[in-house]
């Protein structure tokens, strides 16, 4: 009798909550639809407890915990159920420390399903800048009533397929503040959370200062499946100019200095769903260069397309496929301050001598064309306020397609200036990519990407690129970029370094 009364009371409470839950605000299907999709069969002697999810994808929300007599016996992500012996259990749900979780007492009968209708609230905060680009900034959630902190939230790196985490909190009023600030600060935004409701907000952060400058509801399309599908595709274009001071180890004259004036067009288009993430980046950068002791000539010349696809098995791991195509738009010339004779050597071994040259074209337009492909597993190693790190391991391939491509050097024996033609190459092997971004200070970020292709046991056959960029924000549209790259190519089999100092002016569209 006592157990029957408890069950009736629980059913009445759940029915009352169901009437007040706003399932139309959820990005996940309604609770009953989620339960119907769960394939779990209830065996004899067991009951089934199901806690629905208010948001997608699965795993974005904190897992819930099931206790019996003070001992934790089960846990699962919201949107999934657990099989339990008949009895009365304590279920802990929410974000924050154990003492801050929402505690529910739930009776469970043999052969029956108990569907918990949420009377808690869900909150999703997208951190963006003034150009509506997702940024890796942090914030803190405080209870408006007593100032109790519930934890630190993070912006995301969409380029890596990350998703915004969902907060599960008690209904009430909460403050969003910068990390370390108290409830008494005047630089805060407030949000009212209602029972059974998913609330979505955009938090706008000023890039140079890190100040919060906006907090408003995120537009949610609720009309048709087609419109929801369209919202999964985003695209952004950045047009920027830079003044660049450059040194290079790969020139025959040592390390001459140069001054470059360049413009860059950067477009990033993303497709993002619960399970799928695809990104295409297009970079076109062109400029003129004045090298010390030489005339004005072509400086920066880069055209690149990068495509990445990740299928999420979980928020932290999933298979990936990637491809990179890079080349140059204009011919590449080597200039001589004084007329020089040059011996040109073709791949077949044919030689001819060019007399009194002041300029020699080492590569025509679109030479070389470099292709890189890879397939493997993407995993998130570290996710914190100060540093984020991803590791990709898989099988990779690289092709350097070269046409009339020459390397100019002085013959150490004869002293003659020679241009040796270099042909196309192709390699396959194991690849590894380590991608990192770190916050060194309030206005200083460091991005680093190490990409290596291992083609044999001989380390001399290993080829890699290591790109590093430190960005110092000066204003909302002016950055000082310090670039340091290291590369070992298959054809040259030697290390090449490049350092750049760029004052970059950007405009987003």
Image: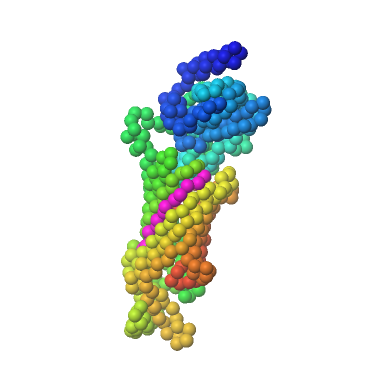
- Quadrant of the frame with the C terminus: top left
In the picture, measured across the screen, residue 106 lies left or right of residue 324, that is: right
In the picture, measured across the screen, residue 117 lies left or right of residue 74, that is: left
**Looking at the picture, how far across and down is residue 116, in whole percent?**
52, 24
Q: What residue do we see at 55% from left, 37% from top? A: 153
Q: What residue do we see at 54% from left, 40% from top? A: 154
* Span colored in magenta: 316-328
Q: Is residue 361 magenta?
A: no
Overall secondary structure of the magenta section? strand
**Looking at the picture, how far across and down is residue 134, in whole percent?**
46, 42
- Quadrant of the frame with the N terminus: top right
Q: What residue do we see at 54% from left, 50% from top? A: 389
**Looking at the picture, how far across and down is residue 364, in whole percent?**
33, 69
- Vertically, is 188 above or below 392? above
Viewer-closest of 104 and 229 = 104
Q: What residue do we see at 46% from left, 63% from top? A: 429
**Looking at the picture, how far across and down is residue 450, in whole percent?**
51, 58
Q: Is residue 33 visible?
A: yes
> Quick one: which residue is furthest to the bottom in this view?
414
- Vertically, is 87 above or below 64? above
Asked which colour scheme the image uses, the reply is rainbow
Figure disc tally: 0
Viewer-closest of 35 and 42 = 42
Q: Is residue 437 visible?
A: no
> Quick one: which residue is furthest to the right in this view?
70
Quarter of the figure with residue 399 = bottom left
């Amino acid at each position: 009798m006592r157990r029957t009364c408890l069950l009736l009371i629980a059913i009445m409470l759940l029915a009352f909550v169901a009437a007040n839950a706003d399932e139309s605000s959820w990005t996940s299907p309604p609770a009953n639809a989620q339960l119907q999709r769960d394939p779990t069969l209830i065996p004899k002697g067991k009951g089934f407890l199901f806690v629905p999810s208010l948001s997608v994808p699965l795993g974005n929300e904190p897992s819930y915990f099931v206790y019996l007599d003070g001992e934790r016996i089960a846990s699962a992500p919201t949107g999934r159920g657990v099989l339990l012996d008949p009895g009365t259990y304590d279920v802990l749900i929410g974000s924050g420390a154990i003492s801050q979780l929402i505690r529910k007492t739930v009776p469970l009968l043999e052969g029956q399903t108990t569907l918990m209708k949420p009377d808690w609230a869900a909150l999703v905060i997208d951190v963006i800048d003034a150009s509506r680009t997702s940024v890796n900034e942090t914030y803190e959630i405080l209870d408006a009533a007593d100032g109790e902190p519930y934890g630190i939230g993070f912006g995301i790196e969409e380029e890596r397929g990350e998703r915004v985490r969902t907060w599960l909190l008690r209904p009430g009023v909460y403050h969003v503040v910068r990390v370390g600030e108290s409830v008494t600060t005047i630089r805060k935004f407030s949000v009212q959370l209602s029972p059974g409701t998913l609330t979505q907000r955009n938090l706008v952060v000023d890039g140079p200062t890190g100040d919060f400058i906006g907090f408003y509801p995120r537009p949610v399309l609720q009309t048709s499946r087609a419109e929801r599908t369209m919202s999964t595709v985003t695209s952004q274009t950045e047009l920027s100019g830079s003044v660049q001071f450059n040194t290079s180890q790969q020139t025959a004259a040592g390390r001459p200095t140069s001054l470059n004036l360049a413009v860059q067009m950067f477009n990033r288009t993303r497709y993002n769903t619960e399970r799928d993430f695809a990104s295409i980046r297009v970079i076109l950068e062109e400029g003129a260069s004045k090298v010390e002791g030489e005339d004005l000539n072509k400086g920066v010349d880069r055209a690149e397309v990068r495509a990445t696809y990740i299928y999420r098995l979980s928020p932290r791991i999933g298979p990936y496929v990637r491809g990179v195509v890079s080349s140059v738009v204009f011919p590449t010339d080597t200039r001589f301050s004084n007329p020089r004779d040059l011996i040109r050597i073709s791949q077949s071994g044919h030689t001819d001598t060019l007399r009194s040259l002041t300029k020699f074209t080492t590569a025509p337009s679109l030479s070389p064309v470099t292709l890189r492909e890879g397939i493997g597993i993407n995993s998130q190693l570290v996710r914190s306020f100060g540093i984020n790190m991803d590791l990709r391991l898989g099988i990779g391939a690289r092709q350097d397609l070269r046409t009339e491509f020459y390397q100019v050097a002085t013959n150490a024996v004869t002293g003659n200036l020679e241009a040796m033609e270099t042909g196309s190459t192709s390699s396959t092997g194991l690849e590894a990519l380590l991608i990192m971004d770190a916050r060194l200070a309030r206005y200083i970020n460091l991005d680093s990407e190490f990409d290596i292709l291992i083609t044999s046991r001989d380390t001399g056959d290993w080829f890699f690129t290591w790109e590093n960029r430190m960005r110092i924000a000066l204003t909302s549209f002016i950055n000082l970029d310090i670039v340091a790259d290291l590369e070992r190519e298959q054809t040259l089999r030697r290390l090449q370094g490049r350092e750049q100092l760029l004052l970059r002016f950007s405009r987003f569209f």
